[in-house]
Image (tube, grey):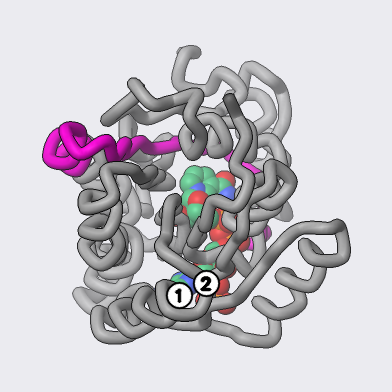
Amino acid sequence: MFDLTLKIALVTGASRGLGFAIAEGFAKQGAIVVLNGRDPQTLEKSAKHIRSNGGRAHIACFDVTDASAIKAAVAHIRDTIGEIDILVNNAGIQHRQLIADLPEADWRRVLDTNLTAPFLMAQAVAPSMVERKSGKIINICSLTSEVGRASVAPYTTAKGGLKMLTKSMAVEWAKDNVQVNGIGPGYFLTEMNTALVEDETFNNWVCNRTPAGRWGNPEELAGAAIFLASDASNYVNGQVIYVDGGFLSSM
Ligand code: NDP
């Protein structure tokens, strides 16, 4: 039910962090994974790590905010590896600043990467899934798809929008047997959060606020991603699964 043997999975932002952990989890289930990011050296190192553990991994270096680069990369993957069965829109960035001081360029940069890119990626990948009547798209959302937090307005706006984009895609493509779902991670130990982990006050807040009493480890996200990428979730559509140590369930 959870087998992904020879399924082709493109994971954006997979050179490190949660994207890498998801790609590694897919590879362990037999998938052929394609790791995306903007730095070819980091990507190759991460792909080598998966290969050294017996997995199948390729790299696709492009910027997910560049529509023509996306089209070219998806065509190249189709020609050299095969049609994409699973797309994970994971690439994301953060920018912390209060709304009153926030430059428009930073607002747009966060929206472009965290919201417009999943739209562009799905637009490039989904037609082949629709034609083949089979496909899985997983959008990496956030706790901020549900709740706000001071100093991260563009991120919250993008992730809230991504939750609704997930539902819109699910509704449009359900009849073609394409399932589109989201995963909302709680606080995970990745490079994006280095500054927060090193801030003692914030670190204590996360550990006290999260019922599990700790940060999540990236590999703990892979199970939900494997579920949503596999036949086990063929009638699950338009949902966001929160993998958050109980965060959103607690006051
Ligand atoms: P990291 O900063 O550790 O990794 C981000 C990844 O995205 C890197 O591989 C980076 O590679 C890539 N990336 C960034 N911008 C682009 C771009 N324009 N084009 C292609 N690749 C890009 O982040 P996390 O692993 O922590 O986060 C992954 C996702 O999970 C994000 O969407 C984030 O918002 C979400 N998330 C994370 C949480 C956490 O606690 N860590 C909590 C909730 C959600 P490179 O810079 O080399 O291009």
Mark 1 touches mark 2? (CB < 8 Å): yes
The single residue placed furthest to the right in the displayed view is 52
Examine the structure image and report whether residue 129 is included in the region drawn in magenta. Answer: no
Q: Position of residue 59 (x, y in %)?
A: 59, 76
Q: Amino acid at mark 2?
A: Ile
> Which residue lies at the image location 27% right of the left edge and 59% below the top edge?
128
What residue is disc 2 on? 81
- Residue 176 in the image, given as x and y percentages of width and height: 20, 39
Residue lying furthest front in this view?
132
* 226 and 163: which is toward the camera: 226
Say if 192 sits above or below 215 in the image.
below
Which amino acid is tagged 1? Answer: Ile
Which residue shows up at 45% across the image and 21% down it?
248
In x, y percent, where is residue 3?
Answer: 62, 35
**Residue 189 in view:** no
Q: Which residues are magenta?
A: 168-194
Q: Residue at x 56, y 28 (%)?
A: 244
Q: Is residue 75 left or right of residue 88?
A: left
Q: Which residue is mark 1?
A: 77
- For the image, the number of numbered tags is 2
The quadrant where residue 190 appears: bottom right
Q: Residue at x 41, y 73 (%)?
A: 78
Secondary-structure class at tag 2: loop
In the image, taking residue 179 as reference, residue 28 lies left or right, namely right
* Label 2 CB-ligand 1 distance < 8 A: no
Between the C-alphas of marks 1 and 2, the distance is 5 Å
- The crowding category of the residue bearing disc 2, from other C-alpha atoms within 10 Å (few below 14, some 14 to 19, many at least 20), is some
Instruction: Give the SS element for disc 1.
Output: helix
- The answer to whether residue 4 is left or right of residue 140 is right
Residue 35: quarter of image: bottom right
